[in-house]
Image (cartoon, rainbow, N blue to C red):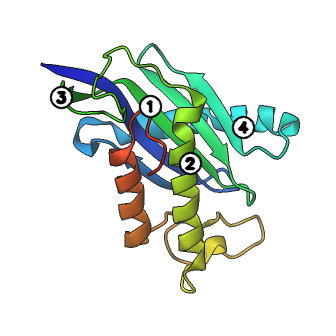
């Protein structure tokens, strides 16, 4: 019998100017990209409200629960880039014999998600982003919207690095509650 465990429904990377740099959906064919774009945008005010009260910790924890199914968690980098993970509490089906991120071999269909469960996701995303910034051909300022009086270069404001996109996909597909490293 298959049980269900929480899984990541969406990962968003938002630039320091609150522009979307990358959005990945899991599974993409069952998710509405426009709906998740709106959900990610709804978290930006929460980052702004909590920012003056944050210290050295980059983990913003639970940003908001949309309903009993979707919850949004956030992480802020030192450069102002925001990572947002949307967790689907109904998640994915897992066979009763799999570990689903737990060492005891048992899966509880009512597994909850704690803030600490998302830290491996955000650490892996931050490492993927750092690796992207190390690429000498990637220019982060090229992905920011033009300011008034500033000429905008032609090109996408989205991250198009195949390696980065594949790493985000791997992170989103690998995560399950209780996993400690990705």
Query: What residue occupies the far bottom of the structure in this picture?
Result: 136
Q: CA distance from mark 4 to mark 2?
A: 15 Å
Q: Secondary structure at mark 1?
A: strand
Is 119 situated above or below 111?
below
Q: Closer to the N terminus: mark 3 or mark 2? A: 3
For discs 1 and 2, the disc positioned in front in the rendered view: 2
Is the residue marked by circle 3 packed among few (<14), some (14-19), or many (20+) residues within 10 Å?
few
Q: CA distance from mark 3 to mark 4?
A: 39 Å
Q: Which mark is residue 146?
A: none
Q: Which mark is residue 47?
A: 4
Answer whether labels 3 and 2 touch (C-beta < 8 Å).
no
- Front residue of 16/144: it is 16
At x 73% / y 55%, what residue is drawn? 80
Provide the residue designation for mark 3: 97
Is the residue marked by circle 1 packed among few (<14), some (14-19), or many (20+) residues within 10 Å?
many
Answer whether labels 1 and 2 touch (C-beta < 8 Å).
no
Q: Secondary structure at mark 4?
A: helix
At x 51% / y 64%, what residue is drawn? 128
Q: Closer to the N terminus: mark 1 or mark 3? A: 1
Q: Is residue 38 visible in this depiction of the protein?
A: no
Q: Closer to the N terminus: mark 3 or mark 4? A: 4
Is 174 situated above or below 133?
above
Is the residue marked by circle 4 packed among few (<14), some (14-19), or many (20+) residues within 10 Å?
some
Q: Closer to the N terminus: mark 1 or mark 2? A: 1
Q: Secondary structure at mark 3?
A: loop
For discs 1 and 3, the disc positioned in front in the rendered view: 3
Provide the residue designation for mark 1: 87
Q: Is residue 172 visible in this depiction of the protein?
A: yes
Is the residue marked by circle 2 packed among few (<14), some (14-19), or many (20+) residues within 10 Å?
many
């Amino acid at each position: 019998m298959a049980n269900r465990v929480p899984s990541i429904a969406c990962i968003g990377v938002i630039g320091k100017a609150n522009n979307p740099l990358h959005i990945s959906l899991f599974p993409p064919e069952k998710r509405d990209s426009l709906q998740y774009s709106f959900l990610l945008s709804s978290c930006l005010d929460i980052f702004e409200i909590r920012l003056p009260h944050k210290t050295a910790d980059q983990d913003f924890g639970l940003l908001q629960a949309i309903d009993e199914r979707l919850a949004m968690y956030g992480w802020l980098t030192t450069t102002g880039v925001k990572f947002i993970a949307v967790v689907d509490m109904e998640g994915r089906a897992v066979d009763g014999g799999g570990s689903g991120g737990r060492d005891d071999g048992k899966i509880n269909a009512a597994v909850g998600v704690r803030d600490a469960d998302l830290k491996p996701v955000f650490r892996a995303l931050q490492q993927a982003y750092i690796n992207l910034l190390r690429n000498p051909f990637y220019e982060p300022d090229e992905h920011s919207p033009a300011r008034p009086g500033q000429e905008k270069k032609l090109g996408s404001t989205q991250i198009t690095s195949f390696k980065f996109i594949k790493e985000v996909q791997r992170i989103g597909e690998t995560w399950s509650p209780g996993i400690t490293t990705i």
